Image (tube, rainbow, N blue to C red):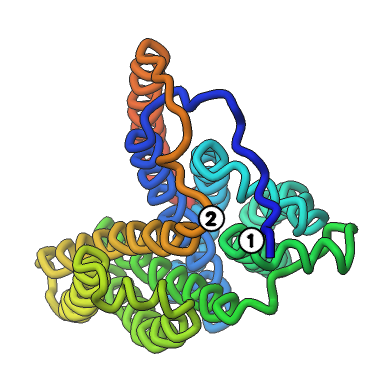
Amino acid sequence: MQIPIPTPDPMPLPAPVWLLRSLLLLTFFLHVVTMNFAFGGSVIALVSKLRAKPEDDAGRLARQLRGMLPVLVAFTITLGVAALLFVQVLYGPMLYSSSILLGMPWMAVIPLLIAGYYAFYWSTLRDSRMAMWIGTIILAVIAFTLTNNMTLMLTPERWTGFYRASMAGIHFNLGDASIFPRYLHMVLGALAMGGLLVAILGLRERDAQHKQWLLRQGGMWFTGATVFNVLVGFWFLAALPRAVAAVLLGKSAGAAILVGASVILAFIAIIELLLAANAGPKTGPALIGITCALITMALMVLVRDRVRAEYLAPYFRPGDLAVAPQWGVIVLFLVLFVGGLATVYWMLRKLAAARRRFPMVAE
């Protein structure tokens, strides 16, 4: 069967594929960290709110996370746009086709983001549990839509059947065996990273009693979500096409090392974060656990990229695209990119200083 993959744009890429791919991986890593902090943090804030009394530790955590969510969502959106642009440059024919087939739900992502962003602001200003629920549910719906699009772009053999069935643009990729384990893998990862955010808050806390409580809660959330995620990971692996799964299981030594290292580092992170809960004033275990968790996330980003490449290998390779580097533009972009990161760092420092100076406003 002939697969209707659009012809790539005849305009050559403005930078080498390795550079564009590196920028894609970097921006996606930053996006996925902030996204997981936002989504996982919103769930933990809700749970803490439900179990809290006004002035206990859970209540304080709910207020701390609630005040951070609008900022985290803003960073998630900004960094997500950057990553999406690089995906479009490298995989345009695949992503545009899947976006057309998904159609209306894909177009709904922008108004949903606006609504979710406003909901988190409203929950911060009015201490509204309902607004927090709305924002969290919206993030879950957007994540499911993105998961559908990112899997649909990997399976062009399904496109013709979808298009013949309906041209209305409402095709979720629910027939793909990997869609639900992939989505659940993402949700549990977000809960684990939400726990990591709680542990980070614990490191910055000056109240010794609340500090230990935060480290304990962060470790418990990270451990529980990660253990379940390992089980879901086996489900996800079994749902992948055999050729793709074989690469991760040893056909490619590099891919297998990435998977093995991510599992080992995840369990080291679990051990260190659990030790941090009873480490007193010592911050070493918490710092090691947080570092291992972030490295694990970076490795999983690389694994995800390899899975995408294996899926698309029979149909499309970015390395086959024409390239005509515009080095002046590239240098200007990199300078502005570094300057942008420096500006963001400065803004975060100012925000943290303001929260320390006006703690009641922060909470």
Q: Find out whether the residues at labels 2 and 1 contact each other: C-beta distance under 8 Å.
A: yes
Above/below status of 94 relative to 170: above
Q: Residue furthest front?
A: 1
Instruction: Compare residues 206 and 171 and report the one nearer the observer.
Output: 171
Instruction: Report the side of 189 relative to 270 (left or right).
Output: right
Q: Amino acid at mark 2?
A: Tyr
Residue 197 figure quarter: bottom left
Q: Position of residue 135 (x, y in %)?
A: 67, 61
Outermost residue, top side? 328
Look at label 1 and name its amino acid. Pro
**Earlier along the polypeptide chain: callout 2 or callout 1?**
1
**Numbered disc in front, either 2 or 1:** 2
Q: Position of residue 73 (x, y in %)?
A: 56, 50
Q: Residues within 10 Å of mark 1 (few under 14, many from 20)?
A: some
Q: Is residue 195 above or below residue 22?
A: below
Using the numbered discs, state the Cα–Cα distance from disc 2 to disc 1 in whole angstroms.
8 Å
Q: Is residue 117 left or right of residue 316?
A: right
The structure residue drawn at horizontal position 15% and vertical position 65%, both measured from the top left corner, is 288
In-front residue for pair 66/177: 177
Q: Which residue is mark 2?
A: 315
x, y percent for residue 67: 52, 54
275 or 205: nearer the viewer: 275
299 or 16, nearer to the observer: 16
Give me the residue at 52% from left, 74% from top: 182
268 up-or-down from 198: above or below: below
Which residue does the image show at 59% across and 27% down from the upper left? 10
Helix, strand or loop under label 1: helix
Element type at marker 2?
Answer: loop
User: Can the viewer see residue 132 in this picture?
Assistant: no
Is residue 43 something that shows in the picture? yes
Residue 156: which numbered mark, if any? Answer: 1
